[in-house]
Amino acid sequence: MTNLSRVIEAAGPDLAAHASADPGPDRFESAADDSRAYVLEAVYEAYLLHYGEPRGFTGMDPDLRLLAGDALYAQGLARLAELRDLEAVAELADLISLCAWAEAAGRRDLVEALWVASARRLLGGSGPGARAEVSGELAQGRA
């Protein structure tokens, strides 16, 4: 079972009617840390529910998509909090807020780089993370 399938299952019975029969493969994989890969899948699906086309859910009106996205953000962060993985909680908090900023500021061009930077940091243990990815933007007051 993929992490994305686990995320969909963990979303609970209220969203089960909207679960995609074939959500496709995981975007994030890590041999070393399955918990962080699971959380990245949950948070990415939450982002897609808010701003894109979700992989795991279909047929939701805009209000339900927003609420479902919030639930998946909470699901991912709660799992990390249970594991006391404060580094990952901080990185994902940055990622979530910076993606929201990029969307609101019309800077969707930055979003993919933010996801890549956070995944590299959380799954591979290398790289400075999402905040460093846009540090130039932030220093120039564009954030």
Image (cartoon, rainbow, N blue to C red):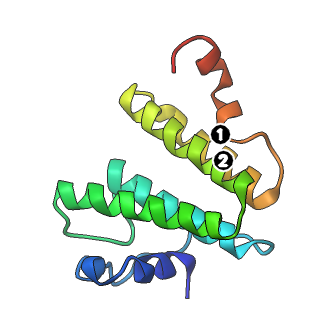
Question: Is residue 137 depicted above or below 119 in this figure?
Answer: above
Question: Residue 117 appears at what percent x and percent y?
Answer: 68, 44
Between disc 1 and disc 2, whose residue precedes? 2
Q: Residue at x 42, y 58 (%)?
A: 46
Q: Is residue 75 visible?
A: yes
- Name the residue type under label 1: Ala
Q: Nearer the viewer, residue 89 or 102?
A: 89
Specify the quadrant of the image occupied by residue 122. bottom right
Image quadrant for the N terminus?
A: bottom right
- Name the residue type under label 2: Glu
Question: Is residue 65 depicted above or below 18 in this figure?
Answer: above
Q: Residue at x 34, y 51 (%)?
A: 50
Question: Residue 31 appears at what percent x and percent y?
Answer: 78, 75
Q: Residues within 10 Å of mark 1 (few under 14, many from 20)?
A: many
Looking at the rendered structure, the secondary structure element under dot 2 is helix
Please give the residue where the numbered disc 1 appears in the rendered image. Answer: 130
Q: Nearer the viewer, residue 74 or 116?
A: 74
Q: Nearer the viewer, residue 43 or 59?
A: 43
Q: CA distance from mark 1 to mark 2?
A: 7 Å
Question: Residue 51 appears at what percent x and percent y?
Answer: 35, 47
Q: Is residue 27 visible?
A: no
Report whether 130 appears left or right of 66. right
Please give the residue where the numbered disc 2 appears in the rendered image. Answer: 91
Q: Residue at x 28, y 59 (%)?
A: 67
Question: Residue 92 appears at what percent x and percent y?
Answer: 60, 50
> Given contact means CB atoms under 8 Å apart, are the residues at marks 1 and 2 in contact?
yes
Question: Is residue 134 depicted above or below 36 in this figure?
Answer: above
